[in-house]
Image (spheres, rainbow, N blue to C red):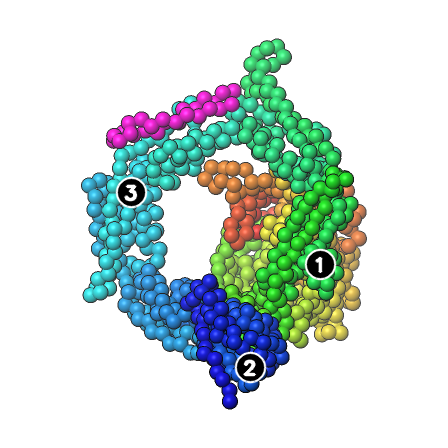
Amino acid sequence: MAAQAPAVATGANTAQPQQADTAGASAATVWQWKGLYVDRIEFEGVTFDKTDDLPNELEQKTGAPLEPQNVRASVRRLFASGRYRDISVRGVRQGDHATLIFAGVPRYFVGRVTIEGVKSERLISVLSFATKLSAGRAFEDGDIAAGTEGLQQMLQQQGYYESKVSAASDIDAVNNQVNVTYTVTLGAQARIGTVTVEGTDVGMTIAEFRKRGKLKEGSKVTRETTSNALTRLRAQYQKNDHLEATVTLQKQTYDATKNRLDYDFHVSQGPKVKVLVEGAKIKTSKLRVLVPIFEEGAIDNDLLNEGVHNLRDFLQQQGYFDVSVDVRVVGQGTGAERVVFTVDRGVKHKVIEVNIVGNKYFTDDILRERMRVIRGNLYRPSGQYSPSLVSADVNSIQALYRANGFDEAKVTTKIQDKDDSANGKPLKEAQIRVTYNISEGPQQKFGKVDVMGVAAARMADVRGLLNAQPGQPFSLVTLSGDRDTVLQYYLSKGFDQVKVEIAQQKEQNNPDKTDVSLNVTEGQQVFVDKVLLSGVEKTKPAVVQQQILVHPSEPLNQSALLETQRNLYGIALFNEVVAAVQNPTGDDPAKNVLLQLSEAKRWNVTYGFGIEAQTGTPSQGMISEASCIQLGLNPCNITQEGKVGVSPRVSLDVSRINLRGTEDTLTLHSAFGLLEQVAILTFQNPHFLSSKKWSGAVSGGYSNIQDITTFTSSTLQGDVRLTQKPERKDTFIYDFQYRRVKVNSLQVSADLIPLQSQPVRVGGPGITWFHDTRSPGPLDAVKGTYSTIQAFVASSKFGSQADFWKVDGSNSTYYQFGKEKYVLARNTRIGYEHPWGPNPNIGNAACAGILLTTNPSCSAVPLPERLYAGGANSLRGFGINLAGPRDLQTGFPVGGTAVFVNTTELRLPAPTLPYVGSSVNFVLFHDMGNVFQNPGDMFPSFLRFHQPNRDTCNDYSGKVGTCSFNYFSHDIGIGARYKTPVGPVRLDFSYNLNPPIYPVIYDFANNPPHVGAAGHFNFFFSIGESF
């Protein structure tokens, strides 16, 4: 007959010391069974599968004698796992054998929290946060009610006072989690009602108060309504010198009958406070930045002293290194209160030398990067100096040396202040020389490098991660890096409680060596039990699984979990990805991973507006000169060099993501402007054949573009494209293109218009290579390179009506140098084009005889397919695509079969300017190159600065002119870049040093034949860097 011992329980609400007592009571209950053979251990309430390691980790083992202290430890271990809300232990005895039963109430955890009834994705995110139900944490009985209360408070803050919230929960017993659904009925959003202002010294009417605070009656109430109103009102009082004004919201009352929110404010504008500076001229706008009483709205000693410090620093930056600043408050408590800063600037100084002496281990450049004392230069004419900056430099240099093993390094300074000239007269600007004398002393080396606490199976891996090696120079940076690397290694293996500590000690026999020990406390290794995925509705599960890097039975890798979250965001199918660990604080050796996804809207519409302004803009919507004559529209207002124009542009994109539950996307891109009208439909597969390195696209559409004064091209095109990205810096594009191109408004010799106006079909394969190592990014590169090569073959074998091949490549480099971080940027473009087969212009009067090879308009390559240069992103000495050969009768540009463009920019650091601060930087640039009729004309023209045989260009006596454009055009200029979140807004002014001339024989504006000339001056206004 079995005897049963009474159960003793421990629960979640019991404090830790009490848990020990409870377990002790349990041990006392079974103490009389000490030594009995435990043949079985059972679990009630919380179950464990065969793969679970926790039962095997209990101190009380089956097949071993019963030990009360082991039972007590087992209870603690089970409860510490986090799986139990309450736990008890009892025993069943059969003779000299016993069965232990651990019975408990399972703990549940927060699962998925869903907000229904709200359409705004932003509001859903805000409301989800308001519930305070973090996925994976322990679930408590009051959580749902607390979440409801948090939702109601947040909804009221958003103006939804009539909203209703209901909650429902679903217990997932298999996965020990509770899923909660909140259903929200928003109701009408409250509106601003009455505004009451109390106080004897308000200083403005209610109407003005509403206006300044943007509290218009009837406007919608949002979470920011009150805070924005308080900020605006305080700013208004401060603007009127009421620096101590107080504006507080006493209460806000909701009127349910009107759905209005009434506000009751209390205001005291206080006295007018004038802030004056005696002894120096400082702009009011700058003073408001330097003196914190403007921002804080109060006057106390701490703020005044901070203002003194800021003013002293500001004036020292202006070169007044000996400046002294005092402050006093006059008329405090009266209506004419003044805060007066008294400044004695002293003699203006300039730092003419900053020398570093004695350094051998570190170069001057490395040390200067850490120094704040700066010699005078273009951006800081007086330099930067103060005793506190010198002291900071000394500390910084010494810290650098000591972090690298130079324990005895010392830095002393020598300051030479010269106020008088050689003849004894005071200098207009005193001179300061600063010298840092460095005594490095001996450098410590690594002695023994020991690793303690690492399991033998992982010792080789850990030692292979260390950069600290015996005999190498000692460095705290190296040790810190090793500690972080080892820590990351353990976290990737599932040791989420790992600790890595570093101990160091100098060797007694060799003080120049430091022994180092990395002491590792591994803790428990945690594995993934299950990956609980939710929120996948329209997306195919296989698409999601490809992005998941954590799997059951593998170590719980926190880095892989974070990377999984990034991957899921990266496929752009989900608005929100919650990645969490269930039971995060428990000591369970196997934990569930939660991946909660919220699918994004499948239809998206985006639109934008842009504008460009520049010289050389083609005349929009104009017909050809020949057509002008035929229609009797004489004179025709078209010029070879275009005009100064503004080109607005609007774009509208409609995209459909998650096609067929995959990453495939269908996008309609459209743009409309004076110079272009485009509509392109593109189908894109970002992972072609499930490969992360390949993507595919099929596109087709229509474009009508006028980016040159000579013609407008209308193109109907189709493209099949494969993109390969073997590594981050390289991209290859393999495509096959077909396009039907027709030119309109053609401004070439009249004899060529009928032939060259005919539609031409161009088709063939192409390949493009991109190599990008720019850093930190494409919009603000300061180092690295960017190279592109494009190759295309059009052949009748592919159905093309024109036969030619084209190669167009460019290379950009970026170098940063100097203390002020100047950037030298360069871009070089070289392009070749080669036609083969019969020339369609043979037999045309404009191309008769030698003109077939000398007249640029007679090239066998269709006009839209030729190479062009000129404009904001090319040769800025020309308007859009106006460089190179011209038609020898009309003088309009016709492109060529070779191009060379080299652009060099010196990008200057941003100075501090009024109003814009440091948001604007300037650029000095030089462009050179040209477009050439034949590839063989390019390199012989490299050293040719002037247009050759210029006199022949002045001859317009024949039917066809004679003029050569085989030379390198040069332009210089200056530009400004204004930083914005979407990229810099660019304004460039250029001066062409050697613009070309050309004969104009046929001028349909009734002008006699004459010589045309490109202009010297050009400007361009656009968005983005030139390269």
Q: CA distance from mark 2 to mark 3?
A: 76 Å
Pinpoint residue 478: horizontal percent, then vertical percent: 69, 48
Q: Residue at x 65, y 30 (%)?
A: 411
Q: What kind of element bears circle 3?
A: strand
3 vs 1, front mark: 1
Which residues make up the magenta segment?
322-347
Q: What kind of element bears circle 2?
A: strand
The picture quadrant where one finds residue 837 is bottom right
Amino acid tagged 1: Val
Write down the residue under mark 2. Answer: 98
Picture layout, residue 978 above or below residue 895: above
1 vs 2, front mark: 2
Pinpoint residue 173: horizontal percent, then vertical percent: 47, 80
Query: Which residue is at the front of the view, 42 or 702?
Result: 42
Q: Residue at x 59, y 82 (%)?
A: 39
Q: Residues within 10 Å of mark 2 (few under 14, many from 20)?
A: many
